[in-house]
Amino acid sequence: MGRQFPFSSSILLQALIVVTISCCSFNIVVEGVIGVNWGRQTSHRLIPSTVVDLLLQNGIHHLKVFSVSDNVLEAFGGGDIAITVTLPNESLKNIMSSEAAERWLQHRIRRHRFNNINISSVYVGNQPFSTFYHTDTYNNAVDTLKYIQEAIYTNGFENIVATTAHFTDVLKPGIMKPSEADFRPDLKKRMVDFVSILNTSNAPFVMDIFPIHFVAQHKWDMEFCFLDNKSNFSIEDNGHVYTNVFEFVYDSFVVALTKAGAPNVRVMVGQIGWPTDGYPGANVSNAERFFREFIPFVKSTKGTPLRPGISIDAYIHSLVDENRGRINLGAFQRHWGVYLPNGKPKYKIDFSGGHRDMYPTTAKGVVFMPNRWCVFKGDKTNLTKVENQVRRACAEADCTSLLPGGSCSQLTFDQNVSYAFNRYFQMNSQYITNGAVVILRTWRPW
Ligand SMILES: *[C@@H]1O[C@H](CO)[C@@H](O)[C@H](O)[C@H]1NC(C)=O
Ligand SMILES: *[C@@H]1O[C@H](CO)[C@@H](O)[C@H](O)[C@H]1NC(C)=O
Ligand SMILES: *[C@@H]1O[C@H](CO)[C@@H](O)[C@H](O)[C@H]1NC(C)=O
Ligand SMILES: *[C@@H]1O[C@H](CO)[C@@H](O)[C@H](O)[C@H]1NC(C)=O
Ligand SMILES: *[C@@H]1O[C@H](CO)[C@@H](O)[C@H](O)[C@H]1NC(C)=O
Ligand SMILES: *[C@@H]1O[C@H](CO)[C@@H](O)[C@H](O)[C@H]1NC(C)=O
Ligand SMILES: *[C@@H]1O[C@H](CO)[C@@H](O)[C@H](O)[C@H]1NC(C)=O
Ligand SMILES: *[C@@H]1O[C@H](CO)[C@@H](O)[C@H](O)[C@H]1NC(C)=O
């Protein structure tokens, strides 16, 4: 980009960066960790024991779930998968004292720990300060973090870390260089308090990055998302050259943390991924391309311009598509999965970062419904009725692939209707009420 910025603005920052680098170069470098997020906002779910098997088959030993659901955690009794659990946003307000935090820990965590379930971190809410996701932000998160952290110490659970994840919108909008980064002015004080708790407990600051969305917001070339350095577009900042959005965002957070008084706080990536539908460029070939370079990058301990040689832990978002997920940012949010909800991989990905050209393991033991689907009869004598029924079907089922930019956005009206009813039919486990304007077909592929 041709934009120039005053040279003088970041002399102090440069000084801080030099200190950071020289102090961190004494750290022992370990390979970055690749974990996976398992969101469960789906009409049909893989059972937890299937997921345990799937993760282990793929050599994944770190999982994040967005709840503290007992029936999920109980499947992880072997202890060889480290689990991050999430205190739901809505529960933050219930943990406003040491006693409440203590009760929560006793009730939700202690029992599982005794059963050898390796709960390694607790997130207090999920992106509580994001404005994209909520109309009101969860202001209590800082206090809740403090109380939970204290309860972890008093219970002797020092090997559990408490933190939460932050979306990129906690940064001041419109930054064109990492050195310009800072937390949003309305959040600054809260962030200073937040990172000071992380600093004293040695918990990581967690950032969630959606490259395709970030680049679109900045109207940058999509090539800038990929780490294979094919982008003609790069950003220069104090002698550092950014050739991809990941390093740009990561270092922007490092700068913001430095300005918040915590230059050395650990940093990790809580969500990063590539959707396969519902957005221009959201497709399987781009997802493959993204991860083909991203995972080896994380594993390489190459680090970023501001944190060279520092390993990066990153959780891939997400294990499966979520047909009931929120779509406030766009239709693509239901298409994050490396896997379809039935446990079949959508694209090739080598979780080990070894550049192997391979599909990940398919989930075992999944019971499939019969091969049959709904097709519109074509009766449009009462078009209003058809349209109303389609609307009702799509209010419950996931029709995001029909939306502009989606993989089925080119369908005809009749095909749209079939698609909508079929999604509804499958979502309801092929149960159908009478009087619907569809017929049922059994699949005969030969
Ligand atoms: C739990 O996971 C952590 C983080 O990976 C690991 O260091 C620890 O050894 C695991 N504990 C057990 C009992 O497997
Ligand atoms: C709280 O976090 C969840 C994810 O765990 C997110 O889906 C939800 O939108 C957030 N809650 C609210 C009220 O925004
Ligand atoms: C972070 O920790 C370091 C040393 O442990 C300390 O010097 C620094 O003041 C702390 N920063 C904050 C913001 O608490
Ligand atoms: C990426 O390309 C730029 C030139 O566009 C070059 O300066 C840089 O060294 C390359 N980086 C890597 C990692 O290959
Ligand atoms: C980069 O620039 C070169 C030369 O201008 C051009 O041939 C190439 O197509 C560009 N690549 C991309 C990905 O835009
Ligand atoms: C995926 O999107 C890219 C544009 O980013 C396009 O060039 C490519 O053909 C698409 N691939 C598929 C399989 O649709
Ligand atoms: C068409 O269907 C709508 C909604 O079901 C109904 O209200 C309306 O009376 C119907 N119109 C005719 C002409 O049957
Ligand atoms: C099909 O449905 C989508 C989503 O509602 C809509 O955008 C599109 O215009 C429809 N196509 C036709 C031909 O009606």
Image (tube, rainbow, N blue to C red):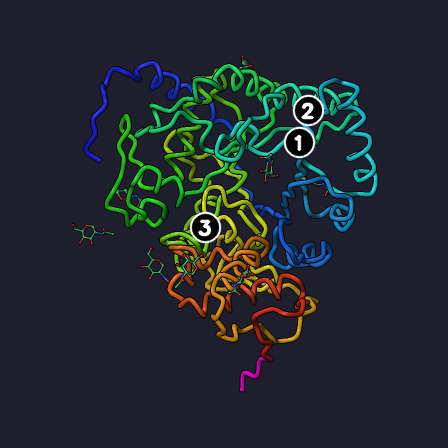
In the displayed structure, 287 sits above or below 269; it is: below
Q: Quadrant of ligand 8?
A: bottom left
Instruction: Between label 3 and label 1, give the one nearer the viewer.
Output: 1
Q: Amino acid at mark 1?
A: Glu
Classify mark 1 as within 8 Å of ligand 2 or not, answering yes or no: yes
Q: Residue tagged by mark 3?
A: 274
Label 2 – label 1 distance at C-alpha: 7 Å
| Discs 3/2, front | 2
**Label 3: element kind:** loop
Contact between labelled residues 1 and 2, with CB atoms less than 8 Å apart: yes
* Amino acid carrying mark 3 in the image: Trp
Q: Which mark is residue 320?
A: none
Check disc 2: other Cα within 10 Å, few if <14, some if 14-19, many if 20+.
some
Span shown in magenta: 442-446
Residue 242 appears left or right of 184: left
Q: Secondary structure at mark 1?
A: helix
**Figure check: 116 above or below 22:** below
Q: Count neighbours of disc 1 (C-alpha within 10 A) and say few if under 14, some if 14 to 19, many if 20 or more.
A: few
Q: Residue at 65% x, 43% y: name it.
A: 65
Secondary structure type for disc 2: helix
Labels 3 and 2: the sequence-earlier one: 2
Q: Which residue is mark 2?
A: 93
